[in-house]
Image (tube, rainbow, N blue to C red):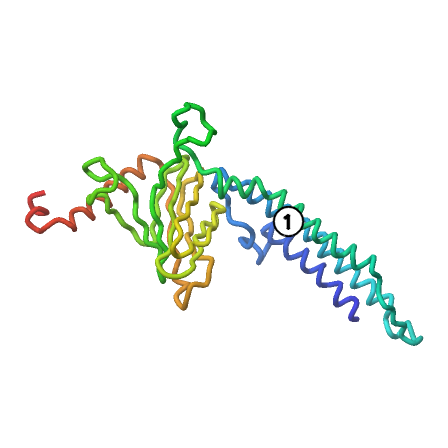
């Protein structure tokens, strides 16, 4: 009975994964969300590789456990228990194999790490006029996303009416509402105001811990319009569950229209009443 019970662990475990991937019955919608990021495929490939690798090990250990329980059942082996000191060779082998596996995964994931943490999109070549060299001009961040307890405050880093970045008329804020243009490289600067947060865009395969005192960047290339989730993937306090925002991916024309409407509305509310009436 116990051997069969333990055999159900790998059987049911594999079944849950298979049914979730197929989206059958109550498991519909329990698999990975749709990937809408041109750079997200490498994350999915890495995920599936690790899942299949660990899945084989999971099934193998489950079957080995079943075999030992079945073969050495106390009702079938009435003789006295025999104790052994162990095998030094076996201990070396089962120490080396996991270490080699982890080293292989570390090397295998280097491309995924570089695409999402190092190869920041560039605006164009630098003074040497050759793209891909150290003097390339990095693409400026579209917005500054700051994690607060318990909301995402978003400041769009766009020049105001004077056309110059960094002046007083540049201030344009939203809360938990991020709009980005479709089919363009988007860079976001992310920070934390208070505690450790984790900026997570599930459909874009972007997740980055936001550490107080550190300026970090994330980037993506959204290729499908729609409204998607922004969540915090780090327990950041009692209101962690409330840190859910909305990401809207839209055409460049719709994005510019929304941007101008929001900017004009916020600039109007900041003007003195007399100037606002004249305007």
**Which residue is drawn at the image coordinates 42% and 24% (left, top)?**
128
Out of 148 and 134, give the one closest to the viewer. 134
Q: Position of residue 151 (x, y in %)?
A: 35, 58
Q: Position of residue 183 (x, y in %)?
A: 41, 35
30 vs 244, left or right, is right
The image quadrant of residue 150 is bottom left
Out of 125 and 163, give the one closest to the viewer. 125
**Which residue is drawn at the image coordinates 41% and 36% (left, top)?**
185
43 vs 149, left or right, is right
**Which residue is drawn at the image coordinates 43% and 36% (left, top)?**
121
The image quadrant of residue 67 is bottom right
Out of 176 and 28, give the one closest to the viewer. 176
Most extreme residue toward the top, as rendered?
129
The image quadrant of residue 248 is top left
- Residue count near mark 1 (Cα–Cα under 10 Å), binned few <14, some 14–19, many ≥20: some
Q: Position of residue 192 (x, y in %)?
A: 37, 56
> Is residue 12 positioned above or below 206 on the image?
below
Locate the C terminus and report the quarter of the image it occupies. top left
> Is residue 36 positioned above or below 124 on the image?
below
Q: Judging from the image, what secondary structure is the residue with disc 1 in?
A: helix
**Which residue is drawn at the image coordinates 28% and 40% (left, top)?**
158
Locate the N terminus and report the quarter of the image it occupies. bottom right
Count of picture labels: 1
Q: Position of residue 242 (x, y in %)?
A: 38, 62
What residue does disc 1 label?
Answer: 50
> Is residue 178 positioned above or below 128 on the image?
below
């Amino acid at each position: 009975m116990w051997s069969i019970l333990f055999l159900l662990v790998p059987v049911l475990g594999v079944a849950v994964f298979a049914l979730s991937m197929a989206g059958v019955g109550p498991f519909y919608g329990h698999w990975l969300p749709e990937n809408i990021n041109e750079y997200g495929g490498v994350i999915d490939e890495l995920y599936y590789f690790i899942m299949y690798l660990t899945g084989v090990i999971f099934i193998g250990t489950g079957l080995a456990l079943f075999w030992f329980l079945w073969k050495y059942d106390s009702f079938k082996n009435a003789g006295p228990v025999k104790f052994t000191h162990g095998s030094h060779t076996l201990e070396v082998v089962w120490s080396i194999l996991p270490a080699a596996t982890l080293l292989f995964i570390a090397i295998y994931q280097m491309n995924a790490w570089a695409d999402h943490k190092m190869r920041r999109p560039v605006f164009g070549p630098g003074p040497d006029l050759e793209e891909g060299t150290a003097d390339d001009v990095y693409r400026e961040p579209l917005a500054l996303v700051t994690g607060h307890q318990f909301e995402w405050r978003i400041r769009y880093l766009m020049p105001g009416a004077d056309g110059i970045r960094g002046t007083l008329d540049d201030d344009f804020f939203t809360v938990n509402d991020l709009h980005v243009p479709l089919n363009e490289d988007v860079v976001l600067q992310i920070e934390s105001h208070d505690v450790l947060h984790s900026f997570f865009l599930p459909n874009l395969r972007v997740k980055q811990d936001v550490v107080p005192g550190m300026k970090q960047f994330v980037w993506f290339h959204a290729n499908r319009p729609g409204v998607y989730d922004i969540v915090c993937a780090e327990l950041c306090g009692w209101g962690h569950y409330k840190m859910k925002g909305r990401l809207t991916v839209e055409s460049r024309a719709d994005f510019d229209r929304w941007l101008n409407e929001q900017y004009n509305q916020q600039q109007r509310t900041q003007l003195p009443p007399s100037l606002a009436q004249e305007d």
